[in-house]
Amino acid sequence: MDERLGPLIERALDKGDVQALNDIAGILDELGMPAPAVSVVEDVERLSARKQGCDRALQEAAQAYLKEAVPRFFKKHKTIKSFSWRQHSPGWTEGETGRFQAHYKYDMETVFEDGASIHEEQSAKKGAISMLNRLGEDALRLALGDGYTITVTRDGISKEHYWDEY
């Protein structure tokens, strides 16, 4: 198979990129193979619209979950002031565009009230990770965006633009 097809097929399927379909048709034509039927383009467009609808629904559900879960978290963990993490898509990873990552499991930063015990700190951090695990990375990306440092406090959630040079 022509090496140019892989990335184009991925763009067509993942992003509903109609131009990628046209490029695939051109490559197939160069190779003497019949171009995809118009129905394939229509299928990709239909699936892309469906995916966008699903993404919107997931975004709304994740935002509603956070709106409910964050105050409950702070009510339970009284000594934590804030927790934060970075979430972004690395620009380049081993020759490929990086996959979105929410760095809350291992790189979460926490701020506690003076005098908080180690047990309280461990329990709060474990609770925050558990709360975010319920959503997963796709929902976090849709709810909070790509390329941000997310900070959660009793007053709500804030985002600061984050840029990964790599």
Image (spheres, rainbow, N blue to C red):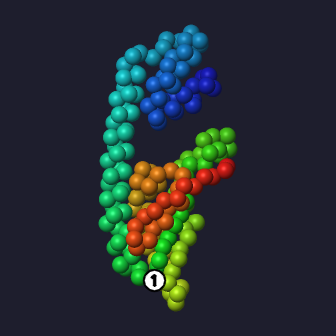
Q: Which residue is mark 1?
A: 79
Q: How many marks?
A: 1
Q: Where is residue 34 shown, x and y percent of the image?
A: 49, 11
**Above-or-below relation of 126 to 159:** below
How crowded pointer 1 is (Cα within 10 Å; few <14, some 14-19, many 20+) is rated as some
157 sits left or right of 148 in the view: left
Residue 119 visible in the current orientation: no
Camera-side residue of 119 and 165: 165
Image quadrant holding the N terminus, namely top right
> Looking at the image, which residue is at 34% across and 29% down?
46
> Looking at the image, which residue is at 54% across and 28% down?
8
Q: Where is residue 121 shown, x and y percent of the image?
A: 51, 81
Furthest toward the top, the residue is 32
Camera-side residue of 81 and 4: 81
Mark 1 residue type: Thr
65 sits left or right of 91 in the view: left
